Image (cartoon, rainbow, N blue to C red):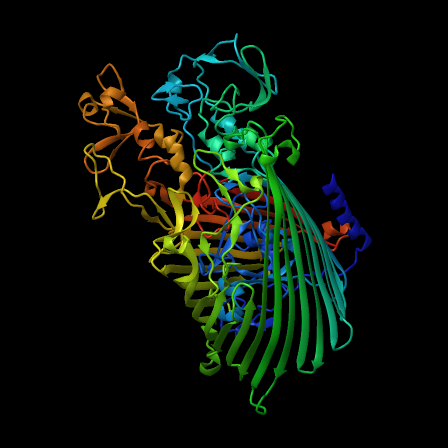
Amino acid sequence: MKYKYLFIMGLSFGLMIPGQSQNSGSNNDTEDTLNLGEVSVNAIGTLFNVSKSGHSVSSVAGKKLVSSGESGVIQALSGKASNVSITKNSGDPGSGAFIQIRGQNTISGSNQPLIIIDGIAMSNSSFGQGTDGVVQQSRLNDLNPSDIASITVLKGAAAAAIWGTAPANGVIVITTKKGSKSGMNIEFSSTLSFDMVNKEYEKQGIYGQGNAGKWVANAPGSWGDKISNRRGGLDSLRTTANKFVADDGSVYYPILAKRDQTVFNKTNRDQVFRTGQTWINNISISSGNARSNMYFSASDWNQKGVLNGTSDYHRTTGRLNFNHMLNDKLSLSMRSFLSKSTSNRIQQGSNLDGLYLGYLRTAPDFDNTDYSGTYYNAVGVATFNSHRGYRRYLGDIQPSYNNPGWTLNKQTNTSDVTRVTVTPEIKYQWKPNSLFTVRTGYDVSTDHRITYFPVLSGGSQANGSFTDDFIQETVLNFHAINQSNFENLLGNNGINLHTTLGYIYTKRSLMEIGGTASQFIIKNQDRFAFINATSTNQNPFNSNQLLLTNQVYGMLDLDIKDKYFLQVSSASEASSTYANRFLTTGASLAYEFTKDIGQSEFLNNGKLRFSAGQIGVAPPAYIWNTNYVGAGSSSGWGETLDGTQFGGTYARSSVQGNPDIRPEQKTEFELGTDLKMLKNKLSLGITYYTNEITGIVLAVDVAPSSGYSSQWKNAASMTNKGVEIDMNLNLVATKDLNLNLYGNLSSNKNNVTDLSGTNSVFLAGFTGTSSRVVKDHAMGVFWGGMYEKNEGKLVLDANGFPQAAVEEGVSGDPNAKYRASIGMNGNYKELTFNMLFETSQGNQMWGGTSGVLNYFGISPETATEVTLSQADADKVVDYSGKKVSALGVKDASGNYTVRGSLKDFGKGDVLLNQAWYQSLGGGFGPVNEDFINDASWVRLRELSLSYKLPRSICDLFHIPSASVGFTGRNLLLWTPFKGVDPELNLTGVSNGRGLDYFTNPGTKSYMFNIKFNL
């Protein structure tokens, strides 16, 4: 009902103010990502002319972010700027995303770019995602995309050197909307989205639960009998003993003989997935005059996810921006923002309580529908709230893996986020050519998380657990800037100088406090309380982090006869994470050569540019000192001893601190050209860059005699080299028809050149397969078990099967060889459209899920059959050495049919069956290279249509203008990777990439919207 109310509220504004101006508060939107000759926003939030810039710049208009239909600002950037790689963590509502500009730049720290909003550094943190648990959001998800006027992407080191060690990973400059200067405008929009899973794993429906070709109750795998060969009808049951009574009254008894031929794959699939829905309502008010302007907005985003349970995301935002000129010299402005979001997410990953793990492993002949009920033993004693799954079909004890229905509906994983940002600013024109600006920023967010596993949940949660976690992050900024213009320095000679002097102070604090209660005393109490556990099972935790930095910087911009443009910048930074001040520098030179050679019909404007910069990457906090950590003891099979239960214990960290630690240093060179051709119809930007990062911080192994296992050192180095091409072409420009073709192409080659003798550095993943840093390879390569090879050829055993190598090694690379996008937009009369295709080529992904599904006999490739003659059946063997003639079923013709497939590794055909998939050829085997697969993809990223309603219709409702539209998101996906969208990543925003292990699926969306300008 609240959406209807908001819709009516929007209409009522139109009735009250029917004749106001139609000007929008977004009148500084830009149309292309090249921005040649246009004004954009630099790293300190001030305007600059892109045509005079000596470094690469990409800008995206705010309306393009809105039209994408994404809840997060970062996700909406996908495909719109060259060499900006964006990976969504999952399709869960409100999930965050990983953004990377020009490759990786550090190992121990974050590779995320610096976020500048209205000239102030803001948070884009994401906490708590690993190989299991739930997908977390990033703080940029808090923003309302409709509030954004433009986004500028600064990629090179020279473009943002004034921020010291912060911008090594690039800078995302976000400018929010201002009020209109020509009267009041009210805009209301409402969008309804239908969301669906965009890629799923196939499950075989031929063989049932069991082992070695026979049905076995509660068996983990689907290596049982052929379902179609069963007798048919109802199973034979024993109705005089124990039983399970489901919540809906259905009764389940022990099975004596399996007869039912029903395959439940579709039923189980429908239990897990649904068509998600999202309602988005947004209203904005923009007004102003020559001296003052105001922009106000309110939005509500309410999403029910595609996972059929407690999967949701609800975000409400409000923004108030205003500017006022007190007099001709003094002006004030304030930008304030409030966001409130709540969500409930679904467990995923390497997690016995996760959704996909239980769902995908479920045998095709088991019905997951009744997951909760009451178990009665043989003498009638009841166990309430019992958990029924395919590993425990009577719910007599906890199942090894959760029934998907239990995960979706019984477990709780809530997050309640409140965020407030306030940015006041004062500008004083103290001289005709000098402007002094003081700007402060206050950004605080709190995230209250509840995680609850009821008793009889899978894995280690059999006796229940509850975690209450509170996180608060605060970013405080102070920024003072003095800018001066000096025209015609040496007389009327066309030499102009612009100087900038500034000071930045930043304070970032992070506090986390919470606790976990496990082994519930009252088993059937759904109460989130620590008192429902003994003191030995109550584990409090807390942490605090404080980072302080300040920069003093200067920047000179020299314009020589509107043809040569030189910029030099430098900053001196002090930080709480290292000892001495650190100097960063940047310089760029642009030459508009068409001012000398003249224009032609083919070439209308041309610019050459070169830039160089040296900036830093701040080391992690507190590693300059050796720390003490909470102590405890545990082993693989025994109990964990928690020091907090024994009066509190601490131990010195095994990693030694280093008081001489210094920032990592990045040196980058960039060369490019910007061209406008064919009567300014074609805009083309080409950039080549190369950078080197030295002194990368690592925990390097040290001799055990030192008393430590490792020490933090500036020990590693890496390089990045790449090319970027941005293009915009106006195809047709007439009164009624306008068509534009746009796109970009980019590549980045990363190479780790030094690790100071360290063999490899773990980033993310598992013991058998991980994403690592390895010398002479790109950062993040896959590391794991390999097949034994001799000069590139498999070494085979006596039966013709490959063998596992003794040592692990590099088995693949998740980094793309190149990325590209191509799109077309335009309008025909009142109809506008946009279509964007995007591709990533050459990247690989670890299909951990596929490997495990092979092990359990679930994947279609494990459910094939082969028929051999008597002679061949006596010759072909499986991995255990058994002949097909001993495994298969003999028909009247003397042929043998057996479950499996044939493969020739080099010595003739062998049988790949259960023996193979549950040893060397499965996901739990010692070799991972079979599951490192090509994850290249091409997708229709966006498709949008909008129609402006005729004036006659608008007059009926007394509104100046209105439009209706459709947007499709990820509607088409082409990829050889099986089962899941390869754009996702199990470990979220970590530096480890390309991992899939029961990751929650991605989505596609169909959105319908209506918009009123009132």
Image position of 303 (left or right of 699):
right
Whether residue 119 is visible here, answered yes or no, is yes
Q: Quadrant of the N terminus?
A: top right
User: Quick one: 934 or 413, which is closer to the camera?
Assistant: 413
Task: Name the residue nearer the viewer: 190 or 856.
Answer: 856
Task: Note whether 933 is above or below 461 in the view shown.
Answer: below
> Hey, which residue is sitting farthest right in the picture?
16
Residue at figure coordinates x 24%, y 38% from the top left: 802
Count of numbered marks: 0
Image quarter of residue 444: bottom right
**View extreme (left): residue:** 871
- Whether residue 344 is visible to the viewer of this picture, yes or no, is no
Q: Is residue 963 above or below residue 351?
A: below
Q: Position of residue 668 (x, y in %)?
A: 44, 69
Please state if 810 lies on the left or on the right of 741 as rendered. Answer: left
Which residue lies most toward the top here?
A: 240
Q: Residue furthest bottom?
A: 491
The quadrant in which residue 523 appears is top right
Residue 398 drawn at (x, y percent): 52, 25
* Residue 569 percent location from the top left of the image: 53, 76
Q: Nearer the viewer, residue 536 or 22?
A: 536
Q: Nearer the viewer, residue 338 or 150?
A: 338
Q: Give percent across and percent down for residue 220.
A: 42, 26
Q: Residue at x 59, y 80 (%)?
A: 498
In which quadrant is the C terminus drawn?
A: bottom right
